[in-house]
Image (spheres, rainbow, N blue to C red):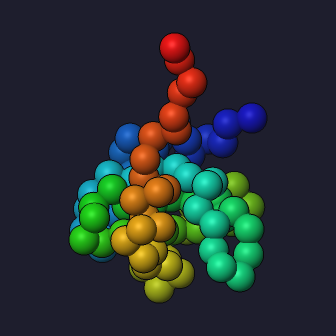
Amino acid sequence: MTSDWQAALPLLKCPRCFAQLATTSSVATETSGPVEGLICANADCRLQYPIRDEIPVLVIEFARELPREEWQAASKPPSTNTP
């Protein structure tokens, strides 16, 4: 099931740097499992915004800055196993 906000994803921008945002559910933290959220596409910003009750929370104070390695892993497109 897609949320209404997903249709508007191309219009959503990072509040800090105004770069494009992308969805992710593959970001794992050390203290918890995968976290669903939106990540900033800007490598210098690397903020992850949470999605709570199917609503993106695009507030900088609630965002988490990802370590570079974690951001790179989360921002890679999913690999496909094609021969």
Residue beneath the point at 54% across and 27% down: 80
Residue 35 at x, y = what percent? Answer: 66, 64
Q: Quadrant of the N terminus?
A: top right
Up/down of 5 relative to 38, above or below: above
The quadrant holding residue 42 is: bottom left
Residue beneath the point at 45% across and 74% down: 66
Left/right of residue 73 with respect to residue 18 in the rendered view: right
Left/right of residue 32 with respect to residue 64 in the rendered view: right
Residue 74 visible here? yes
Residue 15 at x, y = what percent? Answer: 34, 69
Comparing 72 with 64, the one in front is: 72
Up/down of 10 relative to 56, above or below: above
Residue sitting farthest toward the top: 83
Left/right of residue 80 with respect to residue 30 in the rendered view: left
Residue beneath the point at 47% across and 57% down: 73
Residue beneath the point at 63% across and 74% down: 29
